[in-house]
Image: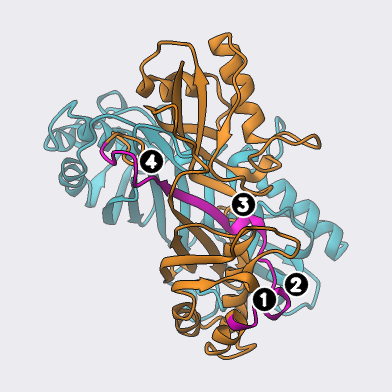
Chain colours: A cyan, B orange
Amino acid sequence: MRRILLKVAYDGTSYCGFQFQKNGITVQQVLEETLSEWLKEDIHIMSASRTDAGVHALGNAAAFDTETLIPGEKYAYGLNVSLPPDIRITGSREVPLSFHPRFTETIKTYEYRIWHSAFENPLTRLYSLHLHGRLDVDRMRAAGLYLTGEHDFAAFAAAGYSSKTTVRTIYRLTIDGERDGMITLSVTGNGFLYNMVRIIAGTLIEVGKGEYPPEHVAEILESRSRKEAGPTAPAHGLTLVNIEYPALDSDAGLQKENI
Amino acid sequence: MRRILLKVAYDGTSYCGFQFQKNGITVQQVLEETLSEWLKEDIHIMSASRTDAGVHALGNAAAFDTETLIPGEKYAYGLNVSLPPDIRITGSREVPLSFHPRFTETIKTYEYRIWHSAFENPLTRLYSLHLHGRLDVDRMRAAGLYLTGEHDFAAFAAAGYSSKTTVRTIYRLTIDGERDGMITLSVTGNGFLYNMVRIIAGTLIEVGKGEYPPEHVAEILESRSRKEAGPTAPAHGLTLVNIEYPALDSDAGLQKENI
């Protein structure tokens, strides 16, 4: 038995999220069916992040066990032959059987993209949120500073979400100014509560619009109350960019794409 | 009677190009039907550039005549209410009745985008060409220098194309290096022969792959023979970014989008 780790990219537009569910097709289902048919085994996928319906990924992670003796790095190429074009495996490797992509320490990076212009852009409409009117990026940056570091992010978690602790650490939060009208919020941390990045995006957008001052974000954090924070920004603006596993040898090909 | 000029953006994925044709739905057809239904007039569109099937636009131009008294700049907002999300009007204005978007001096800018990576990117797959393996951007840049300026571009025009002259001027040709794996070829000129930008892209890609040295592009130009140049690069990598009309007041809103 071997355990194989995949780096998975997908356009979430047509999927009901990553994790298997009854009501619609998911990325996990497509991966399991494609792998099972290829390897003639009953493959079960262990995922790192259950992205919501409509959320995209450039670097989600998924693992599975197989009896097949194909070298780990070959799975990416083999799978891409059969997968639909909106799902690509951009890296694969063998990992220890003890490794689980969700229960291993990670550094995750998400991006939330905002197309800030009077008119929607047809070429980016599926991968960014369109906003017009006032949106002050400097104010959003100032607000973001309050979120960096270790905090109790209870106010930034979807109601009803249960987790042992709501304390998380954001290592870096940057907002790339308006390059050609696109504003990119990039957040890197050791873990994220359910909907946390989308609620952070929704809150920083309210700051950018002038609904409240940047300092108010500190009060929102302190309240630990979901209703104090901004709305959950729409799913299609969010992309899971990368998942890093410090415990795995970082030279092993999953983080880097060899051209 | 008034003449209205529109700045038109579209995702070309689902369209058989801009210009009306029998075999499939085109952007022109959607615009004419939407305008005719809205204005209760039989609207005919004059286009600036008949982009091919699958080619995208951020700034194509189209004009039409109407008896309606709606102020020119209001058409963009009104049309976007009824247009499908893959077509957006990003500016509109009234122009003189003598103005025709195709028969007026223009400065056009196209971009050809290449995703250079071992694996396709699902989030950019519809708007860029995926290439892997060797692709030397510096060599492509060196080759591009031979194309800048006024030249007879007969070798870079689709066979069978008839035009009074095959002399065109490229004001600027730049190749933006690999920002996150994306290579962007940007070409600005006073006009382009049929398929010219896609043949330029196909030729520079051959140089980048090492098929022939950058200097050979000068010989291709001189040959005036289509078969000496590289292949026509696929349509989906191409975007018509902007059309500027120097004769029109450049402050008048079509070039700039007010947020």
Left or right position of B154 against A147 = right
Q: Position of residue B259 (x, y in %)?
A: 29, 34
Q: On screen, B210 above or below A5? A: below
Label 1 secondary element: loop
Q: Which residues are magenta?
A: B222-251
Disc 3 from disc 1: Cα separation: 22 Å
Disc 4 from disc 1: Cα separation: 36 Å
Q: Quadrant of residue B94?
A: top left
Q: Residue at x 70, y 73 (%)?
A: B226
Q: Quadrant of residue B201?
A: bottom right
Residue A115 is marked as 4
Please tell me whether mark 1 or mark 2 is closer to you in this view.
1
Q: On screen, B21 above or below B38? A: below
Look at the image and say whether residue B18 sits in the magenta stretch: no
Look at the image and say whether residue B228 sits in the magenta stretch: yes
Protein chain holding label 4: A
Q: Which residue is mark 3?
A: B126
Protein chain holding label 1: B
Label 2 secondary element: loop
Label 4 secondary element: strand
Q: Which residue is mark 1?
A: B230
Disc 1 from disc 2: Cα separation: 49 Å
Residue nearest the viewer, comparing B232 with A7: B232
Label 3 secondary element: loop
Check if mark 1 and mark 2 are on a common chain: no
